[in-house]
Amino acid sequence: MRREILVAAAILLDSRGRVLLVGNDWGRRGRVRYTLPGGTVEPGETAVEALVREVREETGLRVRSVEHLAYVIQVEDRRKNERTLAMAFRATYEGLLNPRDPDGHIVEARFFTLEEVEERLKGHLPLLEPLRAYLRGERGRFYAYAGWHAPGVVV
């Protein structure tokens, strides 16, 4: 049976324009993968409610406001028989970084320059390309990928 995953993620910038990324070690094998803070929308939850909850859990920050939808990505992972639809929202925040992930997967939450973001996300085009384009001024785009390491299509 095909698995459908809905994700909400936050683009949070500090006063110097750096982007907040979280380091995830999902398999607890020491292989950290960086992403925007966010996660799966749970049953009965809206995307914005999931965004607020996930940012709080993964970073300790409180979402003050959601400004706009930055972009949407779709990833068809045929190997796992999964489709992921992820929405990235530009949001403002308050508080101090203090991750308390109840799942224990977050090993780091830190602000990175665009160059550092590109280094952390290289090899994961669905994570890198839309964020890079957004930070360079593109908004409201839809990105479709045939896999997590495959080139995409921009609409």
Image: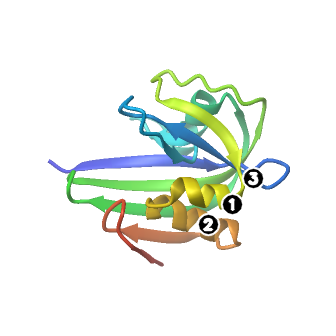
* Observer-nearest of 64 and 96: 96
Horizontally, residue 40 falls left or right of residue 60, namely: left
Q: Is residue 37 above or below residue 60?
A: below
Q: Is residue 18 above or below residue 65?
A: below
Q: Which mark is residue 18?
A: 3
What is the residue that sits farthest to the left in this orientation? 1
Q: Is residue 98 above or below residue 150?
A: above
Which amino acid type corresponds to the residue marked 2 in the rendered image? Arg
Q: At 61% across and 48% down in the image, what residue appears? A: 10
Which amino acid type corresponds to the residue marked 3 in the rendered image? Arg
Marks 1 and 3 sit apart, C-alpha to C-alpha, by 7 Å
Horizontally, residue 139 falls left or right of residue 39, namely: right
Q: What element does badge 3 sit on?
A: loop
Q: Earlier in the sequence, mark 1 or mark 2?
A: 1
Asked whether the viewer can see residue 53, the reply is no
Residue 68 in picture, x, y percent from top left: 67, 58
Q: Earlier in the sequence, mark 3 or mark 2?
A: 3
Q: What element does badge 1 sit on?
A: helix
| Nearer to us: label 1 or label 2 | 1
**In which quadrant of the rendered view does residue 76 lie?**
bottom left
Q: Which mark is residue 132?
A: 2
Marks 1 and 2 sit apart, C-alpha to C-alpha, by 8 Å
Q: At 20% across and 56% down in the image, what residue appears? A: 79
Q: At 44% across and 61% down in the image, what residue appears? A: 123
